[in-house]
Amino acid sequence: MSCQTIVILGMGGTIAGRSASASDNIGYTAAEVGIVELVAAIPALTDNGPVMTEQVAQIDSKDMSFSAWVALAGRVNHFLVQPDVQGIVITHGTDTLEETAYFLHRVCQPSKPVVLTCAMRPATALVPDGPQNLLDALTVARQPDAKGVVTVCAGTIHSALEVQKVHTYQLDAFSSGDAGPLGYVEEGFVRLLRNWPVAQQLPVQAAMKNIANRLASVEWPQVEIIMNYAGVSGAVVEALVAQGVQGLVVAATGNGTLHHALESALLKAQATGIKVVRATRCLNGRVLPKPDDRLPDSNGLSPVKARVELMLHLLA
Ligand code: SIN
């Protein structure tokens, strides 16, 4: 039994959802049950040491906002430096979980575990998945060597770098694509397949970490995601440029390919100083760079994570 504390931060989501009927797994309202009530329903959470809870936000994660991110990063950083805190668990909606995980990975760079967990069924469901997910997240946070930002859902641990929501309904809704999961939680034990996701010691990391100190006062840059598809034109890019957009991430086809009309609009935007990044709309693989690339690739990040990265770069 560990005497160190695990802090559980509540952000809302389906894990805190309530529906009128226990058999209704989709017609519910997310973010209704408070973190104290969620934790109280699972006595086993305190089997291996103390926990403390804090409600940071109570939102359906489709409505995730910069201010909620700033509040969350502030509380994560506050608790990470407390010597009696072993790790942090965050209950969060599944819909933008991967973006929040990546954001925290970049600005907090924790050397302790920060574990995001969630649920696909509301807390009031006949057979909710949230309690087991929360218990598994605590197991990961209590793992002696654990570090970095990870997610836990359906017994599977994913790294913040690769995790993506890939299913609309099934309980095992996340994947790490061809990188594969980080590990599994099985009956209260962690089976690790890869190394914990720790930030590398590069100058860019220090710049990212510095952002955390001034997040509360920054003006977030406008960075939008657009997509390459059959028959696409440059119209959306032109409209965004006219509006003053500062960055564009394009979810390109295949290995970063672009319709000539969209490519020419993006090159024009880039020539005016707007940052443009090419990710791929493919679920697996990454854009492999070529020497004659005229638009930089996302370095393996999905479109939504490439957007977070680009916003942070513009802030840094
Ligand atoms: C949300 O993302 O907050 C709602 C959906 C979910 O948690 O599954």
Image: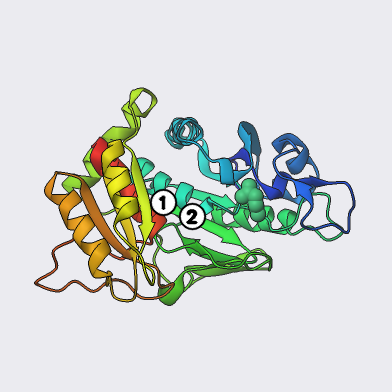
The amino acid on which the numbered mark 2 sits, given as a three-letter code, is Glu
**Where 29 falls versus 229 (above or below)?**
above
Q: Secondary structure at mark 2?
A: helix
**Cβ(mark 2) to ligand 1 < 8 Å?**
no
Residue 240, position in %: x, y?
32, 44
**Where 61 falls versus 217 (above or below)?**
below
Residue 78, position in %: x, y?
45, 30
Residue 3, position in %: x, y?
60, 41
Instruction: Say which of 105 and 308 sits in front.
Output: 308
Instruction: Say which of 108 and 228 sits in front.
Output: 228
- Local packing at callout 1 (Cα closer than 10 Å; few below 14, some 14-19, many 20+) is many
- Local packing at callout 2 (Cα closer than 10 Å; few below 14, some 14-19, many 20+) is many
Residue 41, position in %: x, y?
81, 45
Kindly identify the residue that appears in the image at 46 percent across and 32 percent down.
82
The amino acid on which the numbered mark 1 sits, given as a three-letter code, is Tyr
Instruction: Say which of 231 and 176 sits in front.
Output: 231
In the image, is 272 to the left or to the right of 47?
left
**Where 94 falls versus 181 (above or below)?**
above
Q: Secondary structure at mark 1?
A: helix
Residue 165 numbered mark, or none: none
In the image, is 305 to the left or to the right of 189?
left
Q: Name the residue tied to disc 2.
A: 98
Residue 102 numbered mark, or none: 1
Q: Are marks 1 and 2 in contact (CB under 8 Å)?
A: yes
Cα gap from disc 1 to disc 2, whole angstroms: 6 Å
Report whether residue 4 is seen. Answer: no
